[in-house]
Amino acid sequence: MRVLHVCHWDLSSPDAETIRKLALTRELARRGHEVVLLAPGLGRAPRERWPRGARIVYTPSLGGRFAAHTYALTALPLLALLALVWRPEVVYVTDHTASAPLAVLLRALGLRFVLEVNGIPLQDAKLQGIGSPLWLRLIDIFSRTTYRLAERFAVVSPEIRENVRKALGASRDISVVPNGVDLAAWRPETKAKARARLSLPLDRPIVGFLGSFYQWQGLDRLLAAAPLVLEREPRALFLLAGFGPEEENLKALARPLGDAVRFVGRVPLEEGPTWVNAFDVGVHLVMPGKACSPVKLLCYMACARACVATFGVDGFESVEKDEAGRRVDYHSERSIADGVLAELARARAEDGAGPRVPAAARYGWEGVAQVTEELLQRSRLT
């Protein structure tokens, strides 16, 4: 198949969204399809992460706060050229709050599309601090418009599937396609080797997080529980690797903890496995009820690191089901601290570099691509 994969994302950003888009493009190409990934020219994907066998086409971007909203305008010439000359057989679009103009454009060009939905728009907007009734109404209208124009859906969790069904008010073809992990890149390494490359102390237990600093990630809850952990493990180091809008707030919360907390900053995608392998325990304390698919947990599991996650998040039950760690109460500092301490003790007994959880093999991107391929086949243009 000739597959056109369209996204709104800055592919230079080292986060889970970039990982999914590049990995899915790569795996579809590996399965023998001709794939073009169309993205805004906000930044270039790292060369070592380029999907082999596929092409990335960057459309000019105006940049700034509303770059995603003007994407349909700047993408128009390239989309028209691709539709007329390359003639894609299937189109796969990643949903965004500004996807409606792009959806209208695709349908105007005669291109039906499969829509990937990896969040609940109104929920995400409110968690980002958007409270204006006007903005929330516009976001709702835009998302419903995009949904109505889509041919089929790939959603990353059952909760998101129900939200799409509720928005459409009718039965539609909605497939749950969770996130995956690159098992070749994210593989176990002894913490001694990983920490040596990163100049991190080997004699301190490390509790780590790798990802984006958003309100729903629960890093404020981790910092609130940190004093209870330090009572039992006074040399524990909380390593926060990443970036995001909550960074300054988190640094203010961490200040009383002194050198027990270290902010690493942005971590390039290719360095992610080294940082995770430097952890004894990886945490993902997502706010209960937040719709998501646990990319970070899969990365921790693939690197054989103990995991601490929260109850009340769809998909996080795999942590205990697959014996990769434990879940804790988001609202209880004591529960979080006890979970971290218990997993630190387990990691110490295993030297922090035990074998992969056997179930991790189920979470590779190959499986995600196979399910996506079947969905695209049902939407193939004739």
Image: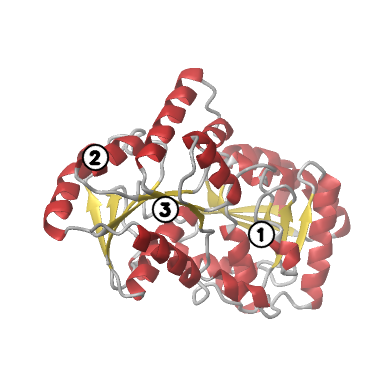
- Is residue 268 or residue 108 the one in the foreground? 108
- Report the Cα–Cα distance between label 3 and label 2: 26 Å
Q: Could you tell which of marks 3 and 2 lies nearer the N-terminus?
A: 3
Q: Is residue 274 left or right of residue 281?
A: left
Q: Report x, y in % for residue 344.
A: 79, 66
Q: Earlier in the sequence, mark 3 or mark 1?
A: 3
Position of residue 372 in the picture relative to residue 4 (left or right): right
Name the element at disc 1.
strand
Which is nearer the N-term, disc 2 or disc 1? 2
Q: Is residue 108 left or right of residue 126?
A: left
Q: Residue sitting at 36 percent across and 48 percent down?
A: 151
- The amino acid on which the numbered mark 1 sits, given as a three-letter code, is Gly
Q: Is residue 271 visible?
A: yes
Residue nearest the viewer, comparing 19 with 378: 378
Nearer the camera: disc 3 or disc 2? 2
Q: Position of residue 148 (x, y in %)?
A: 39, 37
Mark 3 and mark 1: Cα distance apart in space: 20 Å
Residue to which mark 3 is pinned: 13
Q: Position of residue 173 (x, y in %)?
A: 45, 50
The residue lying at 49 percent from left, 25 percent from top is: 136
Q: Quadrant of the N terminus?
A: bottom left
Residue visible at 15% across and 60% down in the picture: 86
Query: At numbered mark 2, what does the secondary structure look like: helix, strand or loop?
Result: helix
Q: Is residue 53 above or below residue 90?
A: below
* Residue tagged 1: 208
Q: Which mark is residue 105?
A: 2
Q: Amino acid at mark 2?
A: Leu
